[in-house]
């Protein structure tokens, strides 16, 4: 792990960000970066996009609906993470717009809705308790996935052990899709997942990645997978060795965020 940890040296050339293509940066990673002040400030010194800067914590004076659902979702997330309240109708409309457009965006919009609405949180709890577990084709994102990743953090720990086991297996089967999108959907659910199954899934994705996964994970996905591996005590080197600077950066941000949060608590 030494070669990867060397990138944490704040004076290394890595932090000049000459390798960083702003158009390819993960919005989720930027949102996490705001929790690590020294990384946040370095990114603010080089990033120009107003959405990216908002996700890093730069103050905005308004939150208005635009023609882009994706930008509206991420601006709303930045607004919420700055400690500002959001009108219930605005978030409900965001989720409805995302549901009609794209399941991945629906996860992000629903997650924000659950965080900002007690009634939406209760609805997610009810759905997770009552939904039948369907057969899922690889890569599918079904309504049950939306509720798992939007409301699972609030609900899974109180479910019956057998239902929790089945849902945990379904969540782990989404690991590949999570790494494709750099969504970090599994991060708040790690503690309730069957560790043996998660470990096996990580090993499978690392040892024999498909040509598609090798390409699509590059740019953050390998860094996210390494984060999950690290959380359950696995060696991250074989995973990070498959990635690029974006993957190393994602892993560094996550490692520092988790450490910073732990120190803060």
Image (cartoon, helix red, strand yellow):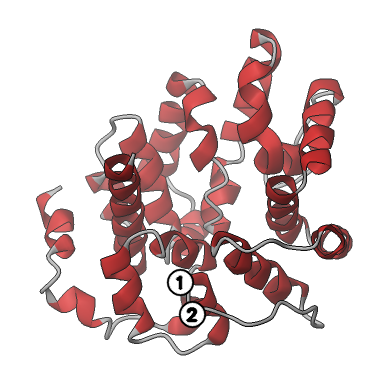
Left/right of residue 68 with respect to residue 247 in the rendered view: right
Q: Residue at coordinates 73% horizontally, 63% vertically from top-left? A: 86
How crowded is the residue under tag 1: few (<14 C-alpha within 10 Å), some, or many (20+)?
many
Q: Secondary structure at mark 1?
A: loop
Left/right of residue 52 with respect to residue 74 in the rendered view: left
Q: Could you say which is closer to the camera, residue 128 or residue 248?
A: 128
Tell me whether the residue at label 2 lies in contact with that at label 1, contact meaning CB atoms closer than 8 angstroms: yes
- Residue 120 quadrant: top right
The spot of residue 137 in percent (x, y) is: 74, 39
How crowded is the residue under tag 2: few (<14 C-alpha within 10 Å), some, or many (20+)?
many
Left/right of residue 91 with respect to residue 218 in the rendered view: right
Which residue position holds label 2? 53
Q: Residue at coordinates 52% horizontally, 87% vertically from top-left? A: 49
Q: Residue at coordinates 33% horizontally, 55% vertically from top-left? A: 251
Q: Could you say which is closer to the camera, residue 216 or residue 7?
A: 7
Q: Secondary structure at mark 2?
A: helix
The C terminus appears in which quarter of the rendering?
top left
How far is mark 2 from mark 1, CA to CA?
5 Å
The spot of residue 217 in percent (x, y) is: 46, 58
Q: Residue at coordinates 58% horizontally, 67% vertically from top-left? A: 78
Vertical relation: 249 (above or below) 53: above
Q: How many marks?
A: 2
Which residue position holds label 1? 56
The spot of residue 119 in percent (x, y) is: 83, 40
- Asked whether residue 244 appears in the rendered view, the answer is no
The spot of residue 13 in percent (x, y) is: 14, 78
């Amino acid at each position: 792990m030494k070669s990867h940890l060397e990138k944490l040296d704040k004076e290394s050339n890595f932090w000049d960000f000459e390798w960083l293509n702003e158009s390819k940066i993960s919005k989720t990673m930027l949102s996490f970066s705001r929790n690590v002040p020294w990384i946040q400030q370095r990114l603010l010194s080089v990033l120009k996009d107003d959405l990216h800067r908002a996700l890093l914590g730069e103050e905005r004076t308004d939150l208005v609906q635009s023609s882009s659902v994706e930008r509206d979702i991420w601006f709303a997330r930045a607004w919420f993470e700055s400690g500002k309240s959001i009108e219930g109708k605005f978030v409900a409309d965001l989720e409805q717009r995302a549901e009609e457009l794209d399941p991945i965006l629906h996860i992000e919009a629903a997650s924000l809705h659950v965080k900002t609405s007690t009634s939406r949180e209760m609805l997610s709890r009810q759905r997770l308790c009552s939904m039948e577990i369907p057969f899922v084709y690889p890569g599918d994102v079904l309504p049950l996935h939306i509720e798992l990743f939007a409301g699972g953090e609030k609900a899974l720990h109180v479910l019956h052990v057998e239902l929790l086991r089945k849902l945990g297996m379904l969540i782990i089967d989404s690991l590949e899709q999570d790494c494709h999108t750099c969504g970090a959907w599994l991060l708040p659910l790690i503690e309730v997942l069957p560790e043996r199954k998660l470990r096996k899934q990580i090993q499978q994705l690392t040892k024999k990645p498909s040509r598609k996964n090798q390409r699509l994970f590059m740019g953050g996905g390998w860094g996210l997978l390494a984060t999950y591996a690290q959380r359950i005590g696995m060696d991250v080197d074989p995973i990070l060795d498959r990635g690029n600077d974006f993957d190393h950066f994602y892993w560094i941000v996550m490692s520092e965020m988790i450490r910073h949060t732990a120190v803060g608590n």
